[in-house]
Image: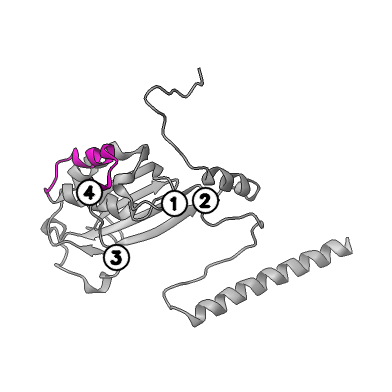
Amino acid sequence: ALLARVTGVLARQAQRAAENGLIGALALGASDVVLRGARRVPADFDARFSALERRYVYRIDDGAPSQGRRAYDPCRRGQVLWVGQALDVESMALSARGLLGEHDFLSYCKPREGATTIRTLRRLDWQRASSGPDAGLVTLTVVADAFCHSMVRSLVGAGLAVGQGRQPVSWPARLLAARSRDQAAPVAPPYGLTLEEVVYPPDSELAAQARRARVVRSLPGPGDDDCGC
């Protein structure tokens, strides 16, 4: 019992030391990072491959007169993309529907050697925020099991092309079906994009999730089915 108590005390001290070390390291670096908490994780935890899904939000100020917003807010230039043209948010939302599910997003990615461009897109919502700090802004909330390089900003770029009337509502889905870098979606600027959440399974499932995520995926062929018949 004494050994267990000593072990518990040492573990807590080690965790506090780790937290203090992180706080100290961040204090010496950029002031735009805040540590809100820390905890020990199993040795087989992988920040990338153990994740179940990620959620990003992209914010756009189109200066829509109907929203009563000022023309440009310089205080948010690093977090919000200014386009200076009222966007057709309803058409943008419609254009996103054909992209949901598991697909090869080659037309929306910069592929990396040896990596797949197949991803499962679980949420892709364009809307104009009606309240809160984002009131009046056009936002895209996107959730997937994982993302390829530049994938989120390419999804934004395709949506903007529709919202600005440069492409029809059907265009993003046609790009997806093309599976070609020759018909790649335009990539939106990085400012405006925020990673808001990464979801992990319980500690006991971290290693198994990492193994699953490392498997290179492929889509079923024309004659394939899922039942194994």
Q: Which residue is mark 3?
A: 191
Identified at 74% across, 66% down, the residue is 11
Residue 52 relative to residue 61: left or right: right
Q: Where residue 84 appears, x then y in whole percent?
A: 13, 62
Q: Secondary structure at mark 4?
A: helix
Q: Earlier in the sequence, mark 3 or mark 4?
A: 4
Which residues are the magenta region? 165-182
* Residue 168, magenta (yes or no): yes
Residue annotated with mark 2: 51
Name the residue tied to disc 1: 54
- Disc 4 versus disc 2: distance between alpha carbons? 27 Å
**Amino acid at pointer 2:** Ala
Residue 39 location, quadrant: bottom right
Dot placed on the residue nearer the N-terminal end, 4 or 2: 2
Quarter in which the N terminus is drawn = bottom right
Residue 224 place in picture, x, y as percent: 43, 23
Q: Quadrant of residue 65?
A: bottom left
